[in-house]
Image (tube, rainbow, N blue to C red):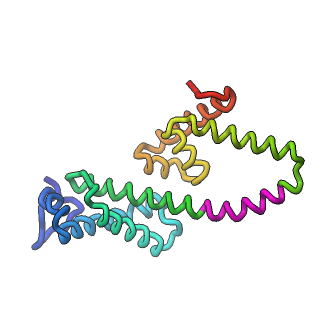
């Protein structure tokens, strides 16, 4: 059994011993999580999941991931270090995406009000109603799409992620993420044209 990525030496442990006791032994749990810290830094930097290029943003993201892993360790169902790293990686990616969504929503919220007021003052009532109807039709068409398609559209258009980042978040290759996005947009267009569930 490989111990790659796990500390070795006088206090060495086997992968299965560590993960078997990590649920009930706080020291073993901490060692398991700490052994993944460098991997998480690498994931955050390579995937550009931290908001800024500075080390502080990366460290904050990694620290938050390790703390959440500590608090939610009872939900971990894996048995190997690789599975633990994958679980923590998913926590890191979701935390980064949620942080981006919150910041964009806050930023868009303040700017959207100003833009709406400017648009309303310069638009005719019929144009405003037409835009609202188009927005409602788009929302309805998005809701009719499968969750996977809604998710890839949201990550690409709202979160402005690259296909590499989308692939990492959805655990598929960059090319698969690109193809999924293309299929999702095609189904959205079809749904918008027909006004019913795409088939």
Q: Main secondary structure of the magenta part?
A: helix
Q: Is residue 20 above or below residue 196?
A: below
**Residue reaching furthest to the top:** 199
- Between 134 and 162, the residue placed more toward the observer is 134
Q: Is residue 4 shown in magenta?
A: no
Please identify the quadrant where the C terminus is shown: top right
Q: Which residues are magenta?
A: 104-119
Q: Residue at x 52, y 45 (%)?
A: 151
State the image coordinates of residue 145 (x, y, percent, origin top left): 55, 35
In the picture shown, does residue 109 fall above or below 142?
below
Question: Which residue shows up at 63% across the image and 30% down it?
Answer: 191
Q: Residue at x 44, y 56 (%)?
A: 94
Instruction: Residue 66 in the image: state x and y as whole percent.
Output: 33, 67
Direction from residue 40 to residue 78 in the image, left or right: left
Horizontal arrangement in the rendering, residue 134 relative to residue 121 (left or right) = left
Q: In percent of the image, x 59 and y 28: which residue is there? A: 197
Q: Is residue 129 left or right of residue 11?
A: right
Query: For residue 106, which quarter of the picture?
Result: bottom right
Near-viewer residue (111 or 82) = 111
Q: Is residue 118 magenta?
A: yes
Q: Position of residue 26 (x, y in %)?
A: 20, 70
């Amino acid at each position: 059994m490989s111990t790659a990525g796990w500390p070795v030496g006088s206090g060495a442990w086997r992968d299965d011993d560590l993960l078997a006791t990590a649920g009930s032994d706080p020291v073993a749990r901490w060692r398991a999580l700490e052994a993944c810290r460098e991997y998480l830094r690498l994931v955050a930097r390579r995937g550009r999941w931290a908001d800024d290029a500075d080390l502080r943003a990366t460290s904050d993201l990694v620290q938050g991931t390790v703390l959440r892993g500590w608090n939610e360790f009872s939900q971990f169902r894996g048995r190997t270090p690789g599975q633990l790293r994958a679980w923590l990686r998913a926590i890191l990616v979701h935390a980064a995406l949620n942080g981006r969504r919150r910041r964009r929503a806050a930023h868009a919220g303040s700017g959207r009000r100003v833009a709406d007021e400017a648009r309303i003052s310069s638009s005719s009532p019929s144009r405003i109603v037409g835009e609202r109807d188009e927005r409602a039709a788009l929302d309805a068409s998005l809701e009719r799409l499968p969750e996977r398609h809604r998710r890839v559209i949201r990550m690409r258009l709202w979160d402005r992620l690259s296909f590499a980042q989308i692939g990492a978040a959805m655990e598929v290759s960059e090319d698969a993420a690109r193809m999924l996005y293309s299929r999702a947009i095609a189904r959205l267009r079809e749904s918008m044209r027909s006004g019913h569930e795409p088939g």
